[in-house]
Image (cartoon, grey):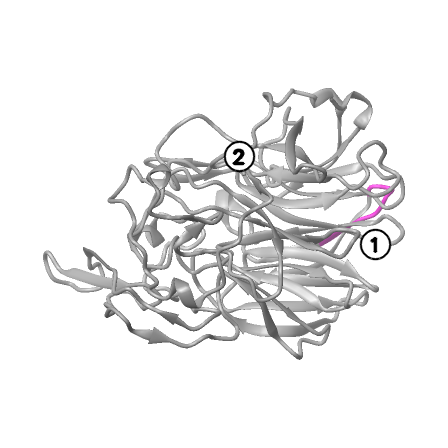
């Protein structure tokens, strides 16, 4: 389907009310039944922020209590369900745990894949009572490369390689780079897909499916048992959520123009996640081959396929919506029945581009909140204004207001790398009376 952009996002800053500030790189927002908010901080030590993830309870009277600290960074998800908080820690290794009201933390799943480009992401509780979560890819597009050093949250090589969710055959596509792991002038390394750095692969080489795998949506029982794969081939499904009719949706973040297998102009995608489907990563983008001219990168040669058994895999799924490139669609919320006239619409946070790390310099994108109409999956602007890096949105269960979590000041600089300000994260409430 066509990429969605809509008209320019209006600056409705006057419709925003500041609820809380002083947060250090918060990623996740959830509410309990009485309307108390819970916020998770990533725990990334940018800008002098304290290392280790933290969880805060924000009462409706403004009082703030620290519930947990020292969590494995980055904390990527926080979901309230039946009196407890499900916490997704992306640290190495990744894990999901349950935080009880008395502060006891029970590990549900541990030793999830990592470290890598992306991590263990948020939990969404399904109509079947199971915990659904995504596991991000360890690489940009399947091959471990030197771009690991560019990622502010990773900056390490070697790191874990990807694990397929379905049985695959490799095409034998290998990338040659400098080898910083060998103390020799001019040392080179050849690296194949789904392999450690410096390990080449051969045409026709077969790899079995793994559980857990990367670039996937998985589910388990609330106690962590009965882990199983739902679907494979979602590069980094950072946001998950169920529609009232029980369908599972995911925002999947598109590949970047970086590393050993760069891709240009790849959009973020909104998918309906279906059991046993394939969403195309690492060889297709929204049902289109990664070799298509529109995805030719500026930072390297056009990518070739790394899989040789497309005919053995399910047809790559097509998205409900293509976001503008580099918008960085993250988490979303479905408007409740009382949020007229937008009941059933999706409100999605657009974190924004991370150029020049993920793409050549260009106009800024994202840094706003948008609305998706499920009748035609069209994208509409809502608010930008003073938002720096919106990352999560939720509807207040007491009064139905839209609450926006802002990650804070976080930019990439060509020479200085990450330029971020600790304590710049905020929580906002948005009034709909001036919505388009």
Quadrant location of the C terminus?
top right
176 relative position to 88: left or right: left
Comparing labels 1 and 2, the label whose residue is closer to the camera:
2
276 relative position to 298: left or right: right
Image coords of residue 15 (percent x, y): 76, 24
Q: 406 or 243, which lies in front?
A: 243
Q: Residue at x 30, y 49 (%)?
A: 303
Crowding near pointer 1: few (<14 within 10 Å), some, many (20+)? some
Res 258 → quadrant:
top left
58 relative position to 47: left or right: right
- Ranked by sequence position, the earlier of labels 1 and 2 is 2
Image coords of residue 172 (percent x, y): 25, 65
Quadrant location of the N terminus?
top right
Which residue of the protein is positioned furthest toward the left in this rendering? 185
Q: Residue at x 44, y 25 (%)?
A: 363
Check disc 2 and report its element: helix, strand or loop.
loop
Q: Eyeballing the image, is 107 above or below 356?
A: below
Image coords of residue 324 (percent x, y): 51, 34
- Is residue 149 highlighted in magenta? no
Q: In the rendered image, which residue does mark 2 sit on?
A: 2
Q: 119 or 408, which lies in front?
A: 119
Image coords of residue 351 (percent x, y): 56, 38
Q: Residue at x 20, y 62 (%)?
A: 190
Q: Eyeballing the image, is 309 above or below 47?
A: below
Crowding near pointer 2: few (<14 within 10 Å), some, many (20+)? few
Q: Is residue 301 visible?
A: yes
Check disc 1 and report its element: helix, strand or loop.
loop
Q: CA distance from mark 1 to mark 2?
A: 38 Å
Q: Is residue 42 visible?
A: no
Q: What range of the chain is rendered magenta? A: 56-62
Q: In the rendered image, which residue does mark 1 sit on?
A: 32
């Amino acid at each position: 389907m066509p990429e969605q952009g809509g008209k320019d996002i209006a600056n409705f800053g006057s419709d925003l009310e500041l609820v809380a500030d002083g947060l250090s790189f918060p990623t996740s927002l959830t509410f309990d039944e009485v309307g108390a908010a819970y916020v998770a901080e990533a725990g990334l030590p940018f800008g002098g922020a304290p290392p280790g993830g933290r969880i805060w309870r924000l009462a409706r009277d403004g009082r703030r209590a620290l519930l947990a600290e020292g969590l494995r960074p980055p904390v990527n998800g926080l979901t309230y369900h039946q009196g407890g908080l499900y916490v997704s820690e992306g640290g190495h290794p990744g894990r999901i745990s349950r935080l009880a009201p008395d502060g006891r933390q029970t590990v549900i799943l541990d030793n999830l894949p990592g470290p890598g480009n992306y991590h263990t992401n948020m939990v969404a509780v399904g109509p079947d009572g199971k915990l659904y979560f995504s596991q991000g890819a360890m690489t940009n597009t399947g091959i471990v490369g030197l771009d690991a050093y560019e990622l502010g949250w990773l900056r390490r090589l070697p790191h874990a390689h990807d694990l397929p969710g379905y049985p695959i055959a490799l095409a034998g596509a290998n990338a040659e780079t400098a080898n910083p792991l060998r103390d020799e002038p001019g040392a080179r390394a050849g690296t194949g897909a789904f392999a450690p750095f410096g390990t080449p692969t051969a045409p026709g080489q077969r790899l079995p499916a793994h559980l857990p795998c990367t670039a996937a949506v998985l589910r388990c029982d609330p106690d962590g048992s009965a882990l199983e794969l739902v679907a494979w081939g979602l590069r980094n499904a950072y946001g998950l959520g169920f529609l009232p009719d029980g369908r599972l949706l995911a925002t999947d973040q598109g590949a970047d123009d970086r590393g050993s297998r760069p891709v240009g102009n790849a959009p973020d995608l909104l998918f309906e996640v279906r059991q046993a489907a394939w969403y195309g990563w690492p060889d297709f983008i929204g049902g289109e081959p990664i070799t298509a001219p529109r995805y030719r990168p500026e930072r390297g040669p056009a990518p070739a396929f790394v899989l040789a058994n497309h005919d053995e895999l399910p047809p790559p799924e097509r998205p409900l919506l293509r976001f503008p490139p580099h918008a960085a669609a993250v988490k979303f919320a479905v408007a409740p029945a009382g949020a007229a006239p937008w009941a059933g619409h999706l409100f999605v946070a657009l974190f924004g581009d991370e150029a020049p790390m993920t793409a050549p310099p260009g106009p800024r994108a994202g840094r706003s909140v948008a609305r998706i109409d499920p009748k035609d999956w069209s994208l509409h602007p809502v608010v930008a204004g003073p938002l720096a890096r919106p990352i999560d949105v939720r509807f207040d269960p007491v009064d139905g207001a839209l609450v926006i979590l802002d990650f804070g000041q976080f930019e990439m600089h060509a020479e200085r790398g990450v330029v971020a300000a600790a304590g710049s994260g905020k929580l906002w409430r948005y009034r709909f009376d001036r919505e388009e």
